[in-house]
Image (tube, rainbow, N blue to C red):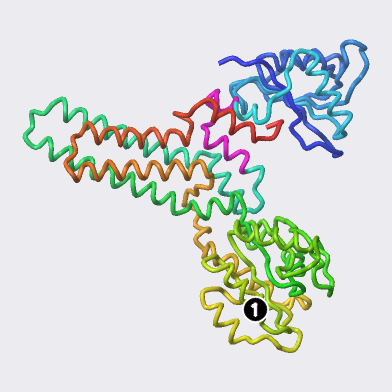
Amino acid sequence: MEFDTIAAISTPMGEGAIAIVRLSGDQAISIADKLFKGVGGKRILHVASHTIHYGQIIDPKTDQVAEEVMVSVMKGPKTFTKEDVVEINCHGGIVSVNRVLQLLLNNGARLAEPGEFTKRAFLNGRIDLSQAEAVMDLIRAKTDRAMNVALGQMEGKLSKLIQKLRQEILETLAQVEVNIDYPEYDDVEEMTHTLLVEKGTYVKAEIEKLLRTSEQGKILREGLSTVIVGRPNVGKSSLLNSLVHENKAIVTDIPGTTRDVIEEYVNVRGVPLRLLDTAGIRETEDIVERIGVERSRQVLKEADLILLVLNYADHFTIEDENLFKAVEGMDVIVIVNKTDLPQVIEMEKVKGLSKKHKLVATSLLEDKGVDELEEAIASLFFEGTIESGDLTYVSNSRHIALLNQALHSIEEAMQAVEFGTPIDIVQIDLTRTWELLGEIIGDSVHESLIDQLFSQFCLGK
């Protein structure tokens, strides 16, 4: 498969020590050679692969020096895209890196689309679709655990398991065909039935094992949407600051200080939290505060975890009780804050309503109880199982949906066998399972889906 030569800036825009402009395609080396001048007039057109060369980028029109660079030359197929790749390391200023990119575009390269380098790696057979998606997961990983899951998937851990399951199904279909085509044995029907049950049970069990990791995997990939709720002035913003370890939210003794939803990402014991500090939920005549309260109620409905904060130094009110009703059936940790002050809250009421929830006492002013809270968050969702290194974690929503469909299909196939359904009908469900698993790794996937997936990538990736 042949493509034109693409170029893009592969490092974040802004000031830094260095920036990298990447080229990929059949003309990558020749385009870079037009612009590069090494020490003693050295060119890069015929240099050895996987070597780096010091020199200057020269504007061919003016013969003026545009940048001082280090140029890496990597010849296909031993590259990320399996094409010739050139990476130009230049000074990390906005003007300098854009100047180099513009010269490449003026001399035969095309600006890459978002994710086009990784897309080419997929289309050229360097990686499969699940590995390509893992590249973006690796870039976006916010904790070590999330990064390890992405690394495992990028290295093909999920792909190998999916390919193994597809091969099992393929061999089963082939064996069933043989039994149908050569029915000279009296027990051929029993043999076919036994084979289908045995293989179907194995495939079903492996898919279920993958799906059991999906909740944790998805949390690691996307972060746990965590909403801090409570009446005004109970310490919600102080809690946000304690978890982030930075003064992100304004803290005052004045109720209603937080008027809108504040969002921050935080790593709690390896669990990525998308932490949302909300306006205190109460009835108010203040128009601006009322809008903030409504937004608080909205994010509450979409949360994975609720941190419900109460005031140890104030009475338990009807508003507190209404908050418990609002989060009923959700994952909730109840935090009784301000334990450095004399107790006023009716703890019997709190304990009665918190029977289904974890209860943690804190004094955020004195930094007490934060460790216990972090441990409660981590154990609520992972309970230590995330540390198991031999598990293949499924974290992508697309993969999870396809695995659920594949599970449904294999279950229908096994039920059909038990009901004595004709084998050719059973084969349809088995083939459907094989196709659904193939969509995960990109063996059977529509071109429009590929375009959509890669459009979410960074421009230089």
In-image side of 446 versus 241 (left or right): left
Question: Image height check: is 217 above or below 421?
Answer: below
- Where does residue 325 sit, x and y in percent of width and height? 57, 71
Magenta span contains residue 141: no
Q: For the C terminus, give its image quadrant.
A: top right
Toward the front, the furthest residue is 285
Residue 205 in the figure: left or right of residue 255: left
Residue 136 lies in the magenta-colored region: yes
Q: Secondary structure at mark 1?
A: helix
Q: Position of residue 76 (x, y in %)?
A: 61, 20
Q: Is residue 73 visible?
A: no
Determine the residue positioned at 41% across, 36% down: 436
Is any atom of residue 341 visible in this view? yes
The dominant secondary structure in magenta is helix
**Dot 1 corresponds to which residue?**
318
Image: magenta residue range: 120-137
